[in-house]
Amino acid sequence: MTAARVRAWLLRAWVALVFGFLLLPVVVVVLASLSRTSYLTVPPRGVTFRWYAVVLRDPEYVNAIGFSLALAGVATLCSLVAGVAASYALIRWRVSGGALVSALLNAPLIFPGVVVGVALLQFYALVRFNGTFAGLALAHMVITVPYVVRAVMASLQGIDPEIESAARVLGASGPVAFFAVTLPLARPGIAAGALFSFIVSFDNVPVSIFLLGAGQMTLPVKIFTAIEYGVDPSIAAISTMLIVATGLGLAAAERWIGFHRFV
């Protein structure tokens, strides 16, 4: 065996060890969700899926799932509208102070979520906007817009602007050229931004926990608060469901969109 082949095998073994180390917590959570005991134990003592049934029959979890889906959907839609418009202006029109605007749009990626949550809580308290669904959706829009902007800007940079110009020369108005030509070409970046926005909004805890009103509860916050009263396999079960759903969504997006090109 040549030295080059030995190095290749050693590199593969190292990569496998790194991936195994990163995936070990996920494996532990999945195994814990299958235990027959009423407390977390790994390896599981027996195998059962009853904890998944417990979660799906619990009205608090079901309501939290529905609320999180609605919130993530609204936040993603708003982020798409604002992010696509901002990206188009920054790429196509080269607006004055574009670098500053781009930095401001991406600022939520830099600041810790707790800082953003506390700041929005104080601001909402001043304008009497706290505890509302609209305020929570707007907060989630703030933290998800950067993902749309980054993905759509990367997509627009790969589109020849002369294609849109040709559409205008052939008689299309500005809006028609944008919606009929540019927007379809930027669809991969838009889809990637929408996917990341939805996942970030759905999984968010630091911002949501400060802004939830009475009767409002997102699934991640529900899990966070449930842990304070003890950890049982139902927590591992709902966590496993989230891991599987997120993994399937990312795999489907990578297969059909190739979103790695836009992040």
Image (cartoon, grey):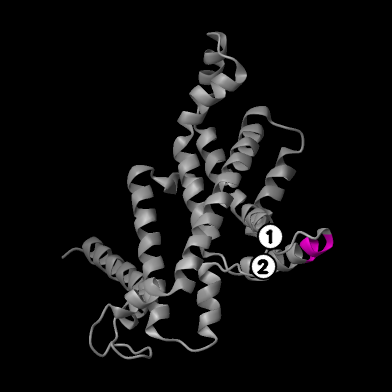
Q: Is residue 22 visible to us here?
A: no
The answer to whether 215 is drawn above or below residue 169 in the figure is: below
Name of the residue lying farthest toward the right:
126
SS for callout 2: loop
Was residue 55 drawn as part of the magenta stretch in this picture?
no
- Tell me where residue 198 appears, x and y as whole percent: 50, 54
- Tell me where residue 63 appears, x and y as whole percent: 49, 66
Report which quarter residue 25 is drawn in.
bottom left
Residue bearing the label numbered 1: 132
Q: Is residue 32 visible to us here?
A: yes
Q: Residue at x 29, y 85 (%)?
A: 35
Foreground pick, 222 / 258: 222
- Looking at the image, do the residues carrying marks 1 and 2 touch, with CB atoms under 8 Å apart? yes
Q: Residue at x 52, y 55 (%)?
A: 70
Q: Residue at x 55, y 13 (%)?
A: 172
Image-based side of 167 in relation to 110, left or right: left
The answer to whether 15 is drawn above or below residue 233 in the figure is: above
Q: Residue at x 56, y 9 (%)?
A: 169
The dot on residue 8 is: none
How far apart are the two marked residues, 1 and 2, measured between alpha carbons? 6 Å
Answer few, some or many: residues within 10 Å of disc 2's Cα (few below 14, many 20 plus, some between 14 and 19). some
The dot on residue 213 is: 2
SS for callout 1: loop
- Secondary structure character of the magenta stretch overall: helix
Q: Amino acid at mark 1?
A: Thr
Q: Amino acid at mark 2?
A: Gly
Report which quarter residue 91 is drawn in.
top right
* Residue segment shown in magenta: 122-126
1 or 2: tag closer to the N-terminus: 1
